[in-house]
């Protein structure tokens, strides 16, 4: 018997024509309709981040799903994540650096794996923090994880953490990106850092008997900061809570506002100095 007849052959079978969907049009349409319905039911307002973006040269307000929302969707679709390739870091001469993270989203239900890649620049976060390297690494991982989950589900959405400013024209608000302009009065680093974190939380207020999104100029508002699993608080809220606790007071002043932490309810509140907050 010839050697070629004894050894197994690994042949690639080629087929003419176009690639075909794995399911019928009706089933695929139902799948994505179910995804939209699921998002409406479990991704709550506090899982969204309002960000100003440029579309055709015009500023528009859009809402993007935050990490908490993507974790809910991952749980619903039985998706887990794990670190992919080793984290990579690129240092610059000025001391700043960029970290790139790779995360794999996978599910035992489908045996599929999807890789997400996320980067974070140390220039995006307030400097001088001893935890800066950890925070940059965590941000890169979060972006990669959100992207992997989004791509696995097939939504193609960008997450709120991805849309946060790097050095991009996507975010046009100077206050949003945390950069001082010539027209703005100089602020202390502590106040500036606090505003940076405050702008990254979803704030609400009440008008009559209905809740609505808080906007600049409102006399008071609140942001739910407890994580979905009830353990700990949201990433950006942690820095504010620590500042309040370190002050030894019930609140800290940021500009013309007082910020306090309502631990039993798991929320931060903000109000203009001297104003009162109605009973919620």
Image: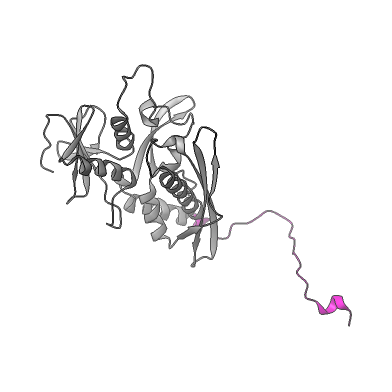
- Between 195 and 69, the residue placed more toward the observer is 195
Where does the N terminus fall, quadrant-wise? bottom right
**Residue 8 belongs to the span the image colors magenta:** yes
Residue 16 located left or right of residue 35: right
Residue 203 located left or right of residue 13: left
Residue at 29% across, 32% down: 190
**Residue 87 belongs to the span the image colors magenta:** no
> Which secondary structure class fits the magenta region best?
loop
- Between 61 and 30, the residue placed more toward the observer is 61
Percent x, y for residue 263? 19, 49
Percent x, y for residue 124? 43, 36
Residue at 35% across, 28% down: 175
- Between 152 and 250, the residue placed more toward the observer is 250
Query: So how many labels did they put on this image?
Result: 0
Identity of the residue furthest to the bottom in this view? 1
Tell me which segment is drawn in magenta: 1-28
Residue 24 can be seen, yes or no: no
Percent x, y for residue 28? 50, 56
Residue at 30% across, 42% down: 239
Percent x, y for residue 65? 39, 45
- Between 234 and 128, the residue placed more toward the observer is 128
Identity of the residue furthest to the right in this view? 2
């Amino acid at each position: 018997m010839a050697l070629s007849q004894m050894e197994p052959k690994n042949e690639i079978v080629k087929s003419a024509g176009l690639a075909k969907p794995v399911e019928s049009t009706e089933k695929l349409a139902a799948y994505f309709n179910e995804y939209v319905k699921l998002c409406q039911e479990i991704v709550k307002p506090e899982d969204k981040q309002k960000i100003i973006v440029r579309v055709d040269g015009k500023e528009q307000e859009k809402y993007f799903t935050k990490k908490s929302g993507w974790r809910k969707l991952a749980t619903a679709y039985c998706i887990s994540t794990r670190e992919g390739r080793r984290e990579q870091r690129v240092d610059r001469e000025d001391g700043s650096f960029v970290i790139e993270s790779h995360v794999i989203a996978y599910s035992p239900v489908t045996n599929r794996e999807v890789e997400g890649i996320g980067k974070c620049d140390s220039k995006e976060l307030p400097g001088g923090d001893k935890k800066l390297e950890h925070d940059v690494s965590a941000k890169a991982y979060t972006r990669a994880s959100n992207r992997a989950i989004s791509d696995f589900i097939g939504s193609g959405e960008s997450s709120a953490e991805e849309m946060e400013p790097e050095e991009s024209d996507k975010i046009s608000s100077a206050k949003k990106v945390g950069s001082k302009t010539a027209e703005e009065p100089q602020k202390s680093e502590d106040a500036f850092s606090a505003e940076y974190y405050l702008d990254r939380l979803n704030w609400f207020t009440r008008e009559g008997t209905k809740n609505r999104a808080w906007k600049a100029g409102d006399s008071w508002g609140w942001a739910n900061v407890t994580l979905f699993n009830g353990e700990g608080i949201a990433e950006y809220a942690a820095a504010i809570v620590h500042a309040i606790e370190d002050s030894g007071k019930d609140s800290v002043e940021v500009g013309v506002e007082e910020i306090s932490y309502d631990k039993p309810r798991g929320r931060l509140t903000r109000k203009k100095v001297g104003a009162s907050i109605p009973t919620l």
